[in-house]
Image (spheres, helix red, strand yellow):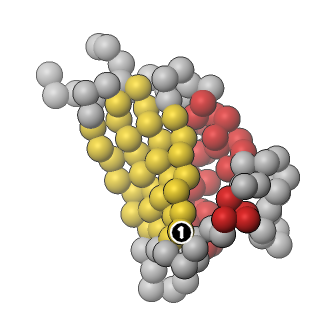
Amino acid sequence: SDDVVVEVDREKIKQVLLNLVKNGIEATPPGGEIVVSTRVQELLVEVEVTDTGEGISEEIKKRIFLPFFTTKEQGTGLGLCISKRIIEDHPGCSFQLDSEEGKGTVATIGFRRSKR
């Protein structure tokens, strides 16, 4: 069959994806783009959330996953920290953030495919 199955905690993954899209919206000026895409590989399903926002400076990248670190006035500094932990708590899954200042950010989540 052509079904692609990943076993995850649906509510927690929804929380991660909503957080990544929300971050993208907040970082992207009017007229910019937020794109959510998927790619299926032999053992992995990748979900990418890409924005054309302001990107993340090298200085901030070093601290981006620290609890309570935020650059937002109303931010808790927990979104990315918790998102990364949720993904990494799923065996065989990965979370990566690539960003270039002035060009945007790509968050990539790798989900291990189920053997079903």
Q: Estimate the x, y position of residue 65 in percent, counting from the top left.
A: 72, 48
The amino acid sitting under disc 1 is: Glu
Report the number of numbered marks. Answer: 1
- At x 40% / y 57%, what residue is drawn? 36
Residue that mark 1 sits on: 100
Q: Estimate the x, y position of residue 8 in percent, counting from the top left.
A: 50, 27
- The answer to which of 2 and 89 lies nearer the viewer is 89
- At x 38% / y 41%, what residue is drawn? 46
- The answer to which of 19 and 103 lies nearer the viewer is 103
In what element is the residue under mark 1? strand
Asked if residue 57 is positioned above or below residue 112 in the image, the reply reads below
Q: Is residue 23 visible?
A: yes
**Quadrant that contains the C terminus:** top left
Residue 99, by quadrant, is bottom right
Residue 27, by quadrant, is bottom right
**Quadrant that contains the N terminus:** top left
Question: Farthest residue in the front direction?
Answer: 58
- The answer to which of 76 and 61 lies nearer the viewer is 61
For mark 1, does the 10 Å Cα neighbourhood hold few (<14), some (14 to 19), or many (20 or more) residues?
Answer: some
- At x 64% / y 43%, what residue is drawn? 83
Q: Is residue 63 left or right of residue 113?
A: right
